[in-house]
Image: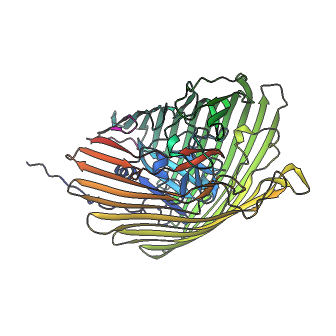
Amino acid sequence: MPTVTVQGDASHEGLGLARQSATASRLNLTAQELPASAESLSADTMQARGDLLVKDAVTRTTGLTDISSPGNGVAYSARGFSGNGSVAMLENGQRPQVGSGTATYPSDPWGYEYIEVLRGPGSIVYGSGTTGATINAVRKAPSRASSFEAMAGYGGGKALRGGVGATGALGEKGAFRIDAYADRSDGFIDRGESRHGKILTSMTYALTADLDLDMSLDHLEQKPQRYFGTPLVNGHISRELRDQNYDVGDADISFNDDKAIARLTWRVTPALTISNELAYMKARRNWRNAEYYYYDTQANVVERSDYIAIQHRQEQTGNRLEARWNAGANRVVAGWEVASINFQHNNNSPYGGSSTVTPTGFNPGVFDSPDPVKPNFRTDTTTNALYVEDAYSVADSLLLLGGVRHDQYKVGRVSLLGAAGFTSRLHSNAVRLGLTWKLASDTSLYGQVSSGSDPVVSLLSLNLANSRYKLTSSRQVETGVKQSLANGKVEWTAALYHIGKDDIITRDPSNPALSIQGGSQSSRGAEATASVTLAQAWRLEANAAYTDAQFDQLIESGNVSRAGNRPADVPKVSANLWLNYRRDGWRGALGARYVGARFIDNGNTQVLPAYTTLDVSLGWNVNRNVVVQLNLRNLTDKLYAATSYSDSQYLLGDRRHAELTVQWRY
């Protein structure tokens, strides 16, 4: 018989309001039901847009700004709060504790089904450090139905990349999945070589009719670009220095991560499920670079200093025991989490070493510091958390969501240089209460109040000076609307929020030489997201965020008040726009990204200029299994700073470039 091909209408994916959110709650609530701002990006959407990094995809969502650097790995700003202490990053619901402010994965989207972003405090599920947002990359799950996919790409900067993924049956009761990915690039600057590689493996097996075993084992290696920014010339970005790299010739950055997870799921009754998840994570990170640059206009030379060598050695073992009840009007989840984290920090403090080079045509030299690398300190951290969350259907049109969480942290620090050690105990409580009112089957209003907490500094790197500080506390009030029309061809959401955060570090007004907890900051804002199918083949996607953030109380060195100033790295306005076309085997997209001006310091004395970039992608379905796609990035070759590394140097965004990819699916 002749082959019959059935192809669904993929001209609109929408905002996924009918999709269950694994990040905002563990109660299988859809985004439409959830009384909070949540957004998701599917693997198909990321591939169609040509997003080759997780941060490329995440910053397409509403109000998320990239502030990543070689020092912090991957980091974002959201709703007026910045860094890995306020924006949590997870992989399949597992969250590594942040060591010295650095988070390194997930870095690329290969092997993930979708990426979810929950804006605002989400600490009922994931603990402290979520005042700004929670980002979760959800893996592709094993399936007994065999499939294979592959990708290969070549592009600007002599970039090469390739990935494979396969899934299928494992015996009569199981399934496996394996995803592998690697890339390399010469970059868009001198000596900008980088490479990444990973392998993700997972399996599921039905031990009995009611008991499942899920396991995963992953290994990731990264050699990021050894680039710490371009020095400013008379306070401005110089196009003539765009391609220059002022790091030393033998600079090194490397991140290695390993993770293993085993989960047992027992379906006790149709309504009651109990699961236990055991996780082990290990990270090894190394830096050896000259990281500070200053352009001396009088002598016409670049002065280099801060010859920094740092090593992180981190191991984390954790367990999550959880019970879920889903029957009648109530959906309830309760759990206990415990983890033990060992972290060692080696460095060459006080980071001596300096050199001077000409702006162009220079010998980069080698890493030459008078300070040897020594073991500095080790911390042993134990965490315990209890949480419970309940989604109660008051009526067919009313859903009440409430939850509470309690976290305890015990941090013991041992100096490896002979200084005094200490033990610090911290705790935090978080609550969330939200109501969703379904005005119609396609329209809902919601409101919520929630609280959370952030550490003053990374818990794993507490020192004696900040060991006396408690966790900061945050609280949020949010209201919004979500609507899906014309069978999902038109979807839009809007939200208003106010967040306050107390107990940030400030100077003692009566004794400016002392640092105390007593400062505060806040943000309020409006966000809107929409997806509209204009015609059968055309779809418009857009989002915009307005953020009014400020320090309410902050005194810095010199007894200078920063009250009323905007925190660093926070744009007032950011927006994304995508026009998509898909028909007769062709797909195309034109995208624009706008990031407003940001200050680089609390004193608001120096500004990162606003920028707009344009991206284009064009794909062709050669047949039902093969897609060829051309991605063009920074179409206008905009010279802009993605973020700052110091007051004298900015990390520049990539120049205009193209990449051709081929994708196979069988």
Extreme residue in the front direction = 298
> How many numbered discs?
0
Residue 245: x %, y % from top left: 54, 34
104 displayed left or right of 340? left
476 displayed left or right of 107? right
332 displayed left or right of 296? left
Between residues 222 and 16, which one lies in front from this camera angle?
222
Residue 635: x %, y % from top left: 38, 52
Q: Can residue 476 be seen by looking at this rendering?
A: no
Extreme residue in the left direction = 1
Residue 286: x %, y % from top left: 60, 29
Location of the C terminus (image quadrant): top left
Between residues 523 and 20, which one lies in front from this camera angle?
523
Q: Is residue 25 magenta?
A: no
Which residue is painted at 77% across and 46% down in the image? Answer: 426
- Tell me the colour scheme of the image: rainbow
Which segment is the magenta one? 140-161
| Image vertical order of residue 504 relative to residue 410, above or below | below
Extreme residue in the right direction = 510
Between residues 553 and 14, which one lies in front from this camera angle?
553
432 displayed left or right of 32? right
Which residue is painted at 61% across and 57% down in the image? Answer: 598
Based on the displayed image, in which of its 4 quarters is residue 391 positioned? bottom right
Based on the displayed image, in which of its 4 quarters is residue 661 positioned? top left
Residue 428: x %, y % from top left: 73, 52
Q: Can residue 347 be seen by looking at this rendering?
A: yes
| Image vertical order of residue 627 relative to residue 166, above or below | below
